[in-house]
Amino acid sequence: MKIFFMLFIFLPSLVLGSNFNQIKKALKEDGFGEIIPEEFHPLISQYAKNPISVSNNSIIGDKSIMFEVNNGECGEEPKSSDCDTDRERSEIYYSHEEWKKVKWYKFNILLPKDFNSIAPATMSLIQWKRLNPSKVLVMFRHTHAGLTFNRNNDSFEDSEIVLKRNDELLGQWTEIIFNTNWHPDEDKGFMKVWIDGILKVDFKGTSNTSKGEELNLRYGLYASAISRYKKVFNTEIIPQRVIYFDGVSAESKCEKLLDKTECNKLLSQTIEKYELFMYDKNDKKFHNHSIVKLPINFLK
């Protein structure tokens, strides 16, 4: 009886761990280049129903990775707890990202047509953090406005650039190309983002901090400040969230990630203005007046 009880307690984490090789194999089939998935994020709830799985809903090859989070699926570790800090997540974790070197990233994401937004809670889809000290650098997030690019106030002056609005985002695959060098020198750092082949962010300046040389990447679904949603919508239940990722890869040169013709098309583009999302933590829905058009030199 004692042995059976121990197996029951640890069964959820064993089941989750047994799937990682399948996830890694599906990612490898698309060619993940210079980023190698390391593990499921340790703060995924051990009681999660179906946090990460292989799906045939794909745009590249015949497989994608589906992430799912349901109400109350928060995880805990001995020194950290999402349950105590207003968070829920389902993410794949990568480490040992290099700084001061150019990197090209590609993600294909699909938020279903009936995706359950939990705005005004924050929902990160892709994020990079520096370690020691642990601080967020940038995030791709889902907000009332749609897909946004966040230079996070952990490390920079906070900004939320609108990349693709919900009426075009939901129910369709979206290609994200992100190019940076994670450089702390304002004369060398830069960040560029293309959405479906169109330049949306072109920033030159500090792209890392002088402390915390080690970086890591994680993507999937990471919700924080979920109490905002509960307060605004007067509920204790957070709806189910699902997202698909496909063709995730990264290389040191564009030509390794894409063909030369496509690289030339991307690099020939310019941008004149940004759409800045000025969100409010008490907003129940999107307001057009929350979008402000600003010149490209406003980013810091």
Image (spheres, rainbow, N blue to C red):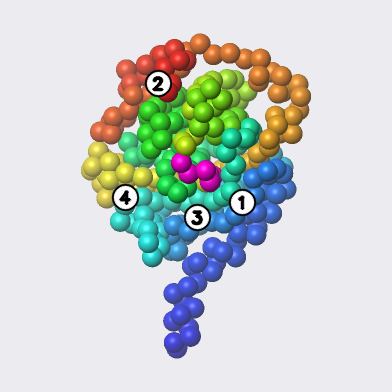
Judge whether 221 appears above or below 269 on screen.
Answer: below
| Mark 3: amino acid | His
Q: Which mark is residue 276?
A: 2
Please name the residue that numbered disc 3 is placed on.
Answer: 41
Q: Quadrant of residue 108?
A: top right
Image location of residue 150, percent across then percent down: 44, 31
Magenta range = 211-217
Q: Residue furthest right?
A: 260
Residue placed at 74% from the left, 34% from the top? 256
* Marks 3/2: CA–CA distance: 31 Å
Please name the residue that numbered disc 4 is placed on.
Answer: 86
Instruction: Using the image as rendered, state which of residue 179 and residue 75 is in the foreground.
Output: 179
Residue 275 in view (yes/no): no
Q: Mark 3: which secondary structure? A: loop
Q: Which mark is residue 37?
A: 1
Image location of residue 110, percent across then percent down: 55, 37
* Marks 4/1: CA–CA distance: 26 Å
| Mark 2: amino acid | Leu
Instruction: Using the image as rendered, state which of residue 290 and residue 187 is in the foreground.
Output: 187
Image location of residue 128, percent across then percent down: 50, 41
| Mark 4: amino acid | Asp
